[in-house]
Image (cartoon, grey):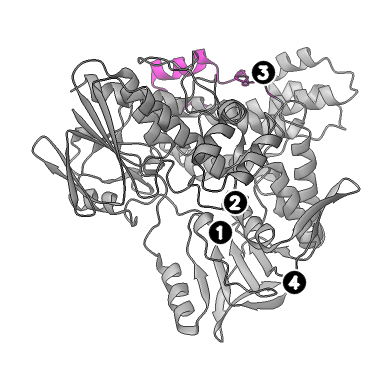
């Protein structure tokens, strides 16, 4: 049997490992394709060592463990932190082109420290080498570095073209990750204007590919987007320019090099993503659901109740942890266990037990903090950034805010359960994708705490400026234009500080375009006014469904391209948590091998 996997990032590699671990009889030949090498584009070695992951080292793994509920074989191995300390130095010295910086990173790394994207990429290369070293005698893996230009259905399989080579495969898996899109109307307008007036305009893309070296010191730069990708530009415009961060009286400060531009950054919300709370949880420790219990979810599944109070219960999970941590952090006369039981059975009665001095959780204020700012935005946003930093520093067990939002991370499988079993109503699906998903991103997938501290230092140093909500960019007299404090700002540089959205209809990925042209891939929609951009798949198998509704048993897609039908597909696997990513890889592998 010949299997093709397009994409050699974490998902492609996990599937490769699951196929070889589970294969038993007959010959198995895997063809692994990626234009950027093992690890893929996001984690490649030839990028800045200052670009960081946003997960702590001990919460990242590629290996299955005893908690992972799968049909296939369990194959244990080190998490990212363990690998760094046990195997990393030797492997880096043997294989890395520039080992010095990575060796220094390993030397200083703590369990709850964050690592560079380069380091995670090297971990993936080592993981791949273990797969090769442990290959059964009847298995073979061929890695081909190059862009898959096309794939087409032929006979009982698929023909894949890379350069001038053709490969005939029995089954094909698409794990292509993030990819750029064709320009939308506004992007085309800005591109045309930039070309006409010799300006700089960068479309959404991986920050490692940002071509910002040509931006000169002192020039005005507009950044649109304050999400995770935005924080990477701290590296681009500060660390890479020779600036230095240092601590003074407990706060991080910035010493400019004189080579920095002036950065004006904004978004619709006007507030940067919340930093990740300092991790205080041991391996495998996750919050236990109090409202979204297994019994509750099973009852919904059995009754097919599409009018459940799922999201109200999800909110209550967060609120309960917030109040319990607040009680634990202060000297209050309220009995925590009595409060917990009362809140679970009647939240209003529970709140009535609390003293007035405890601030009540306010979802509107959490979701749109700038709407509640008082006074000038410049000072109010700095105060809010200080608050974010202070709360994140308290930790995800002790800190009321950090612990509360961390609950959503621990309960992600509850959301996936509802999606997988089609248990959301149309109204709930809109809530899911239009309210919950953006808010979850804002609260739970932000940068490491040090990046927020660095942003604060850069604002204080006058290098970065946050613009108020609903940032606008226009064009005028051969420049880009925005407004700050009712004054017009002009600049020749505009950067879309975000990753490309997942859009099958507009992707420039050649293999996805090829399969869509053949009507084998089709965009997913829940209903007419909720179209997500995802590749349509059969839930539970990840087999592709074509334009006619036919399920293709030998064509699979998982990871980023199906974001919108599945949820949070870019997350990494956490050890000892029954990691969803690893379960999914094993399921696909078993279907390929045994369900023919």
> 395 or 310, which is in the foreground?
395
> Label 2, on which residue?
227
Looking at marks 2 and 3 on the same chain, the residue that comes earlier in the sequence is marked by 2
Kindly report which numbered mark, 4 or 3, lies closer to the viewer in this rendering.
4
Instruction: Report which quarter residue 493 is drawn in.
Output: bottom right
> Label 1, on which residue?
497
Looking at marks 2 and 4 on the same chain, the residue that comes earlier in the sequence is marked by 2
Q: How far, Cα to Cα, is label 1 from label 3?
A: 41 Å
Q: How far, Cα to Cα, is label 2 from label 4?
A: 23 Å
Q: Pointers 2 and 3 in contact (CB under 8 A)? A: no
Q: How far, Cα to Cα, is label 4 from label 1?
A: 22 Å
Instruction: Report which quarter residue 291 is drawn in.
Output: top right
> Label 4, on which residue?
485
The residue range painted magenta reads 281-309
Looking at marks 4 and 1 on the same chain, the residue that comes earlier in the sequence is marked by 4
* Disc ID at residue 256: none
- For mark 3, give the secondary structure: helix
Q: Pointers 2 and 1 in contact (CB under 8 A)? A: yes
Badge 1: residue crowd in 10 Å (few <14, some 14–19, many ≥20) = many
Badge 2: residue crowd in 10 Å (few <14, some 14–19, many ≥20) = many
Q: How far, Cα to Cα, is label 2 from label 3?
A: 34 Å
Q: Pointers 4 and 3 in contact (CB under 8 A)? A: no
Is 65 within the magenta? Answer: no
Picture layout, residue 516 above or below residue 333: below
> Label 3, on which residue?
344
């Amino acid at each position: 049997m010949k299997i093709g996997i397009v994409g050699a990032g974490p998902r492609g590699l996990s599937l490769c490992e699951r196929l070889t671990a589970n294969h038993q009889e007959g010959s198995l030949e895997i063809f692994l394709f990626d234009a950027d090498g093992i690890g893929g584009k996001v984690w490649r070695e030839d990028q800045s060592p200052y670009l960081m992951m946003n997960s702590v080292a001990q919460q990242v793994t590629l290996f299955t463990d005893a908690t992972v509920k799968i049909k296939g074989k369990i194959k244990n191995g080190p998490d990212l932190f363990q690998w760094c300390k046990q195997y990393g130095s030797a492997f880096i010295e043997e294989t890395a082109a520039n080992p010095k910086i990575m060796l220094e990173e390993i030397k200083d790394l703590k369990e709850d420290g964050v690592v560079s994207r380069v380091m995670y990429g090297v971990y993936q290369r080592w993981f791949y080498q273990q797969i090769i070293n442990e290959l059964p005698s009847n298995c073979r893996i061929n890695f081909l570095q190059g862009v898959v230009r096309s794939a087409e259905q032929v006979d009982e399989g698929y023909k894949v073209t890379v350069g001038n080579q053709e490969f005939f495969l029995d089954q094909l898996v698409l794990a292509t990750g993030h990819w750029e899109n064709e320009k939308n109307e506004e992007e085309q307008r800005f591109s045309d204007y930039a070309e006409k007036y010799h300006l700089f305009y960068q479309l959404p893309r991986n920050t490692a590919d940002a071509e910002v070296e040509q931006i000169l010191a002192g020039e005005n730069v507009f950044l649109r987007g304050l999400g995770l990708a935005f924080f990477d530009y701290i590296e681009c415009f500060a660390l890479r320019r020779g600036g230095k961060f240092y601590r003074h009286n407990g706060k991080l400060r910035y010493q400019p090099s004189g080579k920095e531009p002036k950065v004006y950054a904004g978004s619709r919300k006007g507030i940067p993503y919340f930093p990740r709370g300092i991790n205080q949880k041991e391996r495998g420790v996750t919050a236990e659901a109090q409202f979204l219990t297994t019994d509750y979810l099973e009852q919904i599944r059995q009754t097919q109740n599409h009018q459940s109070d799922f999201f109200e219960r999800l909110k209550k999970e967060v609120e309960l942890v917030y109040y319990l941590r607040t009680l634990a952090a202060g000297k209050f006369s309220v009995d925590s266990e009595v409060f917990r039981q009362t809140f679970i059975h009647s939240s209003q009665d529970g709140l009535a037990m609390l003293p007035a001095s405890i601030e009540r959780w306010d979802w509107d204020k959490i979701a749109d903090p700038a709407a509640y700012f008082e006074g000038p935005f410049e000072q109010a946003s700095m105060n809010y950034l200080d608050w974010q930093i202070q709360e994140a520093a308290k930790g995800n067990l002790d800190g009321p805010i950090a612990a509360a939002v961390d609950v959503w991370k621990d309960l992600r499988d509850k959301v996936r359960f509802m999606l997988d079993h089609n248990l959301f109503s149309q109204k709930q699906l809109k809530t899911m994708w239009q309210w919950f998903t953006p808010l979850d991103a804002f609260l739970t997938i932000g940068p490491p705490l040090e990046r927020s501290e660095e942003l604060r230092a850069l604002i204080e140093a006058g290098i970065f400026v946050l613009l108020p909500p609903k940032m606008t960019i226009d064009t005028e007299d051969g420049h880009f234009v925005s407004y700050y404090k009712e004054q017009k700002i002009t600049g020749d540089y505009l950067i879309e500080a975000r990753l490309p959205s997942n859009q099958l209809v507009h992707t420039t990925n050649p293999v996805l375009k090829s399969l869509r042209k053949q009507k084998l891939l089709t965009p997913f929609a829940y209903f007419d006014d909720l179209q997500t951009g995802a590749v349509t798949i059969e839930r539970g198998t990840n087999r592709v469904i074509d334009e006619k509704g036919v399920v293709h048993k030998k064509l699979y897609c998982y990871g980023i391209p199906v974001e919108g039908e599945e949820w949070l597909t870019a997350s990494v696997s956490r050890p000892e948590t029954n990691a969803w990513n690893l379960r999914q890889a094993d399921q696909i592998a078993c279907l390929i091998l045994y369900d023919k």
